[in-house]
Image (cartoon, grey):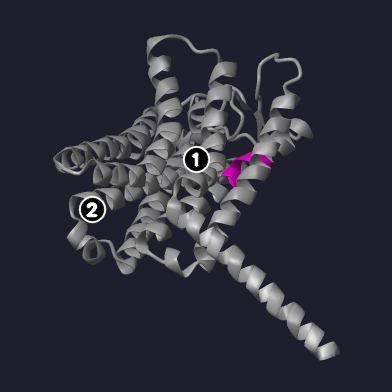
Amino acid sequence: MSSTQSNSSANVTFARPATFFINGFFNIPHAKYYYVFLSLVYVVTVLGNSFIMCIIYLARRLHTAKYIAVFHLAFSDLCGSSALIPKLIDMFLFEHQDISYDACLANMFFVFHFMNLQSLTLLVLAYDRLVAICFPLQYHVIVTKPAMFLIIGVMWIFSVTFISSMVSLITRLSICRSNVVNSYFCDHGPIYRLACNDNSINITMANICFGLLVCMPLILIIISYFCIALVLLKIAQGADRIKAMKTCTSHFILVAIFYVPLLGINIAALATFIHPNARIINNSLTQTIPPMLNPIIYTLKTEEVMQSIKELYKRKKVNTRLLQNKRVNTKG
């Protein structure tokens, strides 16, 4: 009997809100203009990443292992922004800030999953550059299309397993302090802090997530660039060195715009108090600006992509002329 009473008492004290209220900014006038800006960022992100995916799909010269990874980065950017920005616009521009418990967990999963895939894909592109510069003769043997598909498949399995475990652990929390989430989406940290029961495992998972999925890829990327730098220093010809460096510049810029703001805000949070509004602006820009810039950087900074765009444009012009001539001949 005492066991049954204990279980029923535990059930009574366990609280799970029907909805969460996503708070967003604290007392910022004209905050809606910021969300309008993010909606414009989303439009550019969709157009840019769709464009780069179409170019890679249509241009035969880009059907290589490297551009499978670039295609996957564009896909992850597109899906990550789609998981975050449309819901954010709906909540704050149209004042639908209440979100159901299950929908909130789903939103958390997709935002973190695709952000994780972006981080891991940048690591894969660093691996591609490392092999290309340090082992040029073995590159086409090591970095093959089947190998790249396998790496991406392992990334997906790992990310889905880890992020779903992290999100599912939220369901063991009794959310009785409040249902107000002090963030701009269903963020993991602000939600587990609302719990009244032990949330130590959630804190551990958050730390593992940051260390394993943000810090570890960045450390490996830095190591890969250190190895690349050592090889480039040994190249006698200055022209060859510059040519090799150019192949890394696009990726290096992507790494900088993705990781620097993300690490900056987390390191600053350890040293001093950061106002929630500053954290929201930094984190939202970190999650939305890189996906918008990635296709632009790859288009403008990568000679192969620019060449492929020119070839596809010329092919389209030729096809258009042939079609016009055919119509003229038919009428004649």
The correct choice, above or below, for 255 with respect to 197 in the image is below
Pointer 1 with pointer 2, Cβ within 8 A: no
Lateral position of residue 310 relative to residue 198, left or right: right
Identify the residue at horizontal 31%, vertical 46% (top origin): 243
Image: magenta residue range? 81-86
Q: Nearer the viewer, residue 127 or 287?
A: 127
* Percent of width and height locating residue 82: 61, 47
| Mark 1 → mark 2, Cα distance in angstroms | 43 Å
The correct choice, above or below, for 332 with respect to 171 in the image is below
Q: Nearer the viewer, residue 263 or 125?
A: 125
Q: Which residue corresponds to mark 1?
A: 171
Badge count = 2
* Percent of width and height locating residue 280: 57, 24
SS of the residue under disc 2? helix
The correct choice, above or below, for 88 with respect to 32 in the image is below
Q: Nearer the viewer, residue 244 or 150?
A: 244
Q: Which residue corresponds to mark 2?
A: 131
**95 falls in the magenta region:** no
* Percent of width and height locating residue 20: 64, 33
Identify the residue at horizontal 55%, vertical 59% (top origin): 309
